[in-house]
Amino acid sequence: MILNEIKTKGIKKEFRETEKVLKSLGFVRWAWDYEKATYDYKYNHDGKEYYLRLRGTVINDKQLEHPKALLELGTPVFARHFFPHGLDDSVEIPKDLLTTVNEKLKEMEAALI
């Protein structure tokens, strides 16, 4: 589920600050290369794994882990993990998780703006 109502798309922050903010909120930088990063917040619910995911792309001449690399953030996505590997971002947020996910999204948005 693409979460268009969250206003993170287009936010530009230095890597160091982005990393600090998202780690403090419990996000983990899983997938990354020299030009982009993916931050995930994991939910375990009814024996299934879900992720709240936020991606960032480097937009200046630095590589990702350089503290002055400038990241442009995208739109958050909620997805379900499928074994052995794969994410389905067309799933709805389970009703039991809706309040928790919405609180995390508001917290993330406020910390990044």
Image (cartoon, rainbow, N blue to C red):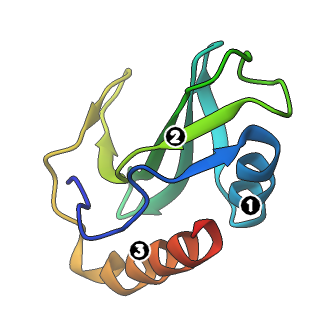
- As measured in the structure, the alpha-carbon distance from the residue carrying label 2 to the one carrying label 3 is 22 Å
Q: In this view, does 108 lie above or below 84?
A: below
Q: Is there a contact, CB below 8 Å, between mark 1 and mark 3? A: no
Residue located beneath label 1 in the image? 21
Judge from the rendering whether residue 5 lies leftward or rightward of residue 112; answer left or right. left
Mark 3 Cα-neighbour bin, 10 Å: few <14, some 14–19, many ≥20 = some
Judge from the rendering whether residue 99 lies leftward or rightward of residue 22; answer left or right. left
Report x, y in % for residue 104: 51, 75
Q: How many marks?
A: 3
Numbered disc in front, either 2 or 3: 2
- As measured in the structure, the alpha-carbon distance from the residue carrying label 1 to the one carrying label 2 is 14 Å
The amino acid on which the numbered mark 3 sits, given as a three-letter code, is Val
Report x, y in % for residue 65: 80, 24
Marks 1 and 3, the one that precedes in the sequence:
1
Quadrant assignment, res 21: bottom right
Q: Residue 101 carries which label?
A: 3
Residue at image position (16%, 53%) is 91
Quadrant assignment, res 30: top right
SS at circle 1 = helix
Residue located beneath label 2 in the image? 72
Quadrant assignment, res 69: top right
Residue at image position (26%, 61%) is 3
Marks 1 and 2, the one that precedes in the sequence:
1
Mark 1 Cα-neighbour bin, 10 Å: few <14, some 14–19, many ≥20 = some
